[in-house]
Image (cartoon, grey):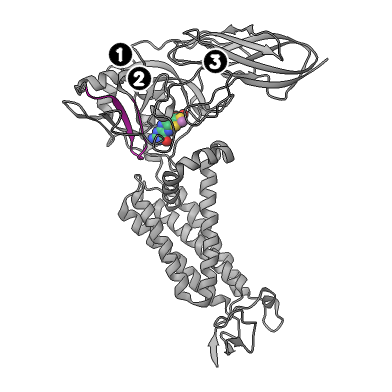
């Protein structure tokens, strides 16, 4: 005769789930209290992104659009809770199994933390330890509460509990679900109350952990940052066509698309931030935020686009960027003639490289610290980022910039290059219909067709619209600050009743007509004409 605790498997699983929640909650709280440290979940997510970014970027963008980050966090939390359930089942048989499991996941978390450029290794160890202790303690408590009242342990004979429940395996005694309602045993009020209480505690810990996070220190430094006036006057933003639904010429910061691998937006203190200029140069140097702001600055309107943008997509925006010309910053370091690649690196391990010959003094290329007249928003790279006209963001627009390294074209591949994207990333000529909306029903008669078109550095010379299989009709073009930006286009259509397919194409400043060949974003940018179907009522 042998004595084993009998714990229903639902109770064991619930205990494991609540224990995992307690571990996550404890980790969040510890990370929040630890100061400007990413949360454990975020560190695991960052590691996940860096490992699986190549597959993830397409998959995640396809599945979740730009909501890929919340989706990843939800995925990590749900997987953790499921693992918790398994550990709960294991712990009901042998408690040490569950405890070892929690410790192992703590180590995985601490490891991810150590590799997360935003987190410190020692902080990660402490945070992971708090999470593990919270998880194991919760598990222990709940499993104790889950034991049958009055039958703390059930006698087991030859592996079969005689008094209680049914043995599932030879040496385990797990009661089936129905057994919970066994009238011989009152409902486990203590267990349910304990689970509810600890679950609520875990959730509160997570919420408090998020609240106490001192994100405010960077944000207030950002708001205090006094922008020097640019040496050159800002080119006035053109008035633009007033058509409801048409993208404004300048994209407001709050509407500007955001794409990056950062699960936690880096919060950088400008007082300690530095920018290194190094590599194949005679005089490497380091610049502080104040020194950068003290240099002669320019303000340039530049359209930025993500290579992942689909035809007709919205991963593109136009802003006035203020900053110091990259050419000036490089000159000061005396670059070697052998330098053929300029690599920007961020504090979060991202990197992007482009040909050094592009920085010829003609092309607009800046280390930008302001966007549309305000210090760079944190999500767009505060305190400084690169902006190079005419290049997709993934090869040029490094946010949270920490280093500019001159090297050779062959010596280094940026973040997305080693993940299968093209090494050269010039922005392709593109045009988009903003209005009417796809599938819109409109009344017959005069109706505007309008949108934006861009071919940064080359400019746009012509935009044409085609109705169904008709002839290409030239559109009115809005003014631009320079060839580095998109422009608005407008076609005043006298819409006849029926279903119609509207198509747009642009011609760049060199006279090249935008190709109608359909290509997906990978590996070097989508092509094809944007079309919209509309229904016109008589
Ligand atoms: N540090 C960092 N910078 C980055 C990225 C990144 O993942 N990390 N993504 C790049 C990509 S792919 C694009 S398209 C642009 C987007 O800039 P935005 O988010 O300000 O629009 O940032 C670039 N700079
Ligand atoms: Mo991008």
> Visible in this render: residue 209?
yes
Q: Is residue 347 in the magenta section?
A: yes
Provide residue 371's location: percent of width, then percent of height: 42, 23
Residue at mark 3 to residue at mark 1: CA–CA distance: 27 Å
Front label number (3 vs 1):
3
In this picture, residue 19 sits left or right of residue 476: left
Label 2: which secondary element: strand
- In the rendered image, the residue lying farthest to the right is 538
Residue 11 position (above or below residue 360): below
Provide residue 77's location: percent of width, then percent of height: 52, 54
Numbered mark located on residue 361 in the image? 1
> Visible in this render: residue 245?
no
**Residue where numbered disc 3 is placed:** 514
Label 3: which secondary element: loop
User: What range of the chain is rendered magenta?
Assistant: 338-354
Q: Which image quarter: residue 377?
A: top left
**Residue where numbered disc 2 is placed:** 365
The front one of 195 and 256 is 256
Badge 3 or badge 1: first in the primary sequence = 1
| Number of marks present in the image shown | 3
């Amino acid at each position: 005769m042998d004595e084993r605790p009998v714990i229903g498997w639902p109770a064991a699983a619930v205990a494991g789930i609540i224990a995992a929640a307690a571990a996550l909650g404890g980790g969040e709280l510890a990370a929040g209290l630890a100061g400007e440290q990413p949360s454990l979940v975020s560190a695991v997510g960052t590691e996940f992104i860096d490992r699986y970014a190549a597959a993830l970027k397409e998959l995640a963008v396809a599945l979740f659009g730009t909501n890929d980050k919340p989706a990843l966090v939800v995925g990590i939390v749900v997987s953790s809770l499921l693992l918790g359930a398994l550990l709960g089942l294991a712990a009901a048989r042998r408690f040490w199994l569950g405890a070892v499991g929690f410790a192992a996941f703590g180590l995985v978390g601490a490891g991810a933390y150590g590799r997360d450029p935003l987190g410190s290794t020692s902080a990660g160890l402490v945070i992971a330890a708090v999470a593990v202790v919270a998880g194991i303690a919760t598990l222990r408590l709940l499993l104790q509460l889950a034991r049958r009242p009055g039958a703390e342990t059930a006698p087991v004979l030859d592996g079969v509990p005689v008094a209680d429940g049914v043995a599932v395996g030879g040496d385990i005694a797990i009661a089936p679900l129905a057994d919970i309602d066994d009238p011989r045993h009152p409902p486990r009020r203590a267990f349910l109350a304990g689970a509810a209480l600890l679950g609520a505690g875990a959730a509160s810990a997570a919420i408090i952990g998020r609240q106490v996070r001192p994100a405010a220190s960077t944000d207030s430094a950002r708001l205090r940052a006094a922008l020097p006036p640019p040496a050159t006057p800002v080119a006035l933003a053109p008035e633009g066509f007033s058509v409801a639904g048409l993208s404004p010429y300048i994209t407001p910061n709050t509407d500007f698309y955001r794409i990056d691998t950062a699960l936690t937006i880096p919060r950088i203190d400008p007082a300690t931030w530095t920018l290194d200029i190094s590599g194949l140069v005679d005089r490497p140097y380091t610049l502080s935020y104040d020194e950068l702001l003290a240099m002669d600055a320019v303000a340039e309107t530049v359209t930025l686009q993500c290579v992942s943008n689909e035809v007709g997509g919205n991963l593109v925006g136009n802003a006035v960027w203020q900053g110091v010309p990259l050419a000036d910053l490089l000159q000061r370091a005396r670059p070697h003639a052998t330098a053929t690649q300029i690599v920007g690196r961020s504090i979060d391990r991202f990197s992007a490289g482009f040909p050094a010959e592009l920085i010829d003094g003609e092309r607009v290329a800046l280390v930008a610290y302001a966007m549309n007249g305000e210090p760079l928003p944190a999500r767009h790279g505060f305190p400084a980022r690169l902006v190079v006209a005419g290049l997709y963001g993934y090869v040029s627009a490094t946010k949270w910039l920490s280093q500019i390294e001159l090297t050779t074209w062959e010596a280094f591949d940026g973040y997305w290059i080693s993940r299968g994207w093209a090494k050269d990333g010039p922005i392709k000529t593109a045009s988009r219909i903003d209005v009417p909306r796809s599938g819109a029903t409109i009344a017959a008669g005069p109706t505007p067709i309008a949108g934006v078109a861009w071919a940064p550095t080359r400019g746009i010379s012509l935009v044409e619209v085609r109705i169904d299989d008709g002839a290409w009709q030239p559109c009115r073009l809005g003014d631009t600050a320079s060839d580095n930006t998109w422009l608005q286009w407008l076609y005043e259509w006298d819409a006849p009743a029926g279903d119609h397919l509207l198509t747009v194409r642009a011609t760049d400043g060199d006279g090249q007509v935008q190709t109608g060949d359909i290509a997906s974003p990978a590996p070097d940018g989508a092509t094809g004409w944007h079309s919209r179907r509309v229904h016109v009522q008589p």
